[in-house]
Structure formats: C-alpha cells, structure tokens
Amino acid sequence: MLRTALWLALPRVHAAAGALWASPRLREQYPAYLAIMHGLVRSSVPLMKAAAEGCSSMIAEGCTPMIAEGSAPAERGAPLLAEYLRGHIEEERDHDRWLLEDLAVLGVGHPDALLPPALQEGVAELAGAQYYWVRHLHPACLLGYMAVLEGCPPSADLVARLPERTGWPAAAFRTVASHCEADPGHLRDLIGLTDSLSLTPEVSVVIARNAGYTAVRAARLLEGLALQPRGDDPPVDPPGMS
C-alpha cells in the first residue's frame, strides 16, 4: 500500500523539485529552499522520538492509539519499529545544524526570515500534522512522511553542477550532497521495514494516506517557492485581491 501511494504521489514532488533545480532563478531561490528544508529537518528528530515513545507506550500498555473505534492489541512490530526509529535518529542527528552551516556560507543567519508567511505556514502544516498522526493514530504513520522526504533527493550529477550553475560555493551544498547519497538507501530500508512490521490493515491505510498528504504538501511548498516574486520585484497580490 505504501509503495502504491508513493508511485501515485511522488511524481508531483519530483516535478516540482525538477522545476526548482532547472530554474533560471535557482541562485536566488536556493537560500529559501535551504530555509524550508531547515524548518522540516529540525522537526525530524523530535518527531522520531515521539514515535519511538509511542511504540514504548504500546508495548507497555498492550494497546495501540485509537484507530476508528476501539483499540487493537499491541503490534508485534512495535519493538522493531522503535529500534529502527532510534537508529535513524542517530543518522539524522545534527542535520539541522548542517543546514544552518550551509546557510551561513550564503550569508544567512536567520533562515526563517527568508520565508514569507505562506511558506512558513506550509512547513508548519506539513511537519506539525505528523504529531497528530503519531500520537492519535499510530506511531508507524510517521513512515509515510519519512518515505516521501527520503524519496526525492536530487541526483549526484545534478548536485555536482550546482556550484557552477548558481555561483554559490560548493560548501553551501554539503547537506544536499549528503542526502543525495544517503536517501535512496534509507528509502529502501524503510520500505523493507514496512514489509516486516505485521501491521493491521487500518494502520497500513493511514501510513499510505500520510504519504499522500505529505507528497501533496511538499510539492506545494516547492511550487510556492517558485512563485515568490524576485527580490527586486514588488509583491504580487493573489487573484481577486487587487
């Protein structure tokens, strides 16, 4: 089910990312792209900790959070999921600091200041919703979110060309380069994990729904970034507002 959701949902994300990387305004847009990524990545470890703690509660209490009506027996896969999350926490730790260091190379000290309210709200809508999925549906719901974020890295060839295309120093692309190498393996591991968790059909459905939710909103963030006016252009009112 997760594979199907990714097959249906990821093309829009890939299209939005491809348009960004091919944009003639990439030099101008790249700092804001890093700011968006920082907003998401700084939430990654806290989200995985919340999901791992949810697994521990399931094991201790012998039941899952509410799914539809009533509760289900604790999943046999809860210890395996908790182990995976704790290992991935260590792999992702300090990546938000990496992004701040990349932004510092560009002369940016406060990434949130680069994002207009609409993009800040998009980050909050995407990352913030995960706490609801994890705490009120099932800790494994986070896998749908993680699968989308791990499923859209740029290619190594593209990343190698970015300094020349943008004029920014190679040091500004450290985090992007690291993820283009690591994320494909992470996605394979995550898909393999879902196959071994013995999840109920209800939980499998909400994981897939979360993948679709995440993909749509991640694409909107990238599309919204492309629509931002140039730094030297006046803001453009949305249709019907002028």
Image (cartoon, grey):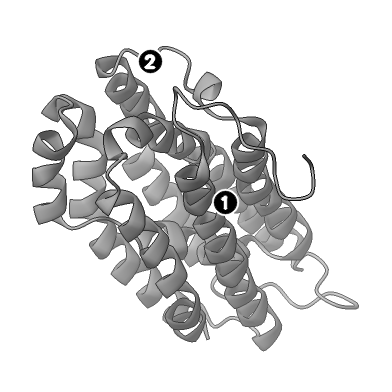
Relative height, residue 164 to residue 217 (above, below) = above
The quarter of the picture where the C terminus appears is top right
Name the residue that disc number 2 marks: 108
Name the side, left or right, on which 140 lies relative to 87.
right
| Picture residue at 48% right of the left edge, 15% below the top | 110
**Badge 1: few (under 14), some or many (20 or more) residues near its Cα, within 10 Å?**
many
**Quadrant assignment, res 191:** bottom left
Name the residue that disc number 1 marks: 52
Residue 88 x, y percent position in the rendering? 38, 50
Residue 3 x, y percent position in the rendering? 44, 82
Relative height, residue 70 to residue 89 (above, below) = below
Residue 127 x, y percent position in the rendering? 61, 46
Q: CA distance from mark 1 to mark 2?
A: 34 Å
Question: Residue pushed farthest right?
Answer: 69
Kind of residue sitting beneath label 2: Val
Q: Earlier in the sequence, mark 1 or mark 2?
A: 1
**Badge 2: few (under 14), some or many (20 or more) residues near its Cα, within 10 Å?**
some
Label 1 SS: helix
Name the side, left or right, on which 35 lies relative to 61.
left
Label 2 SS: loop
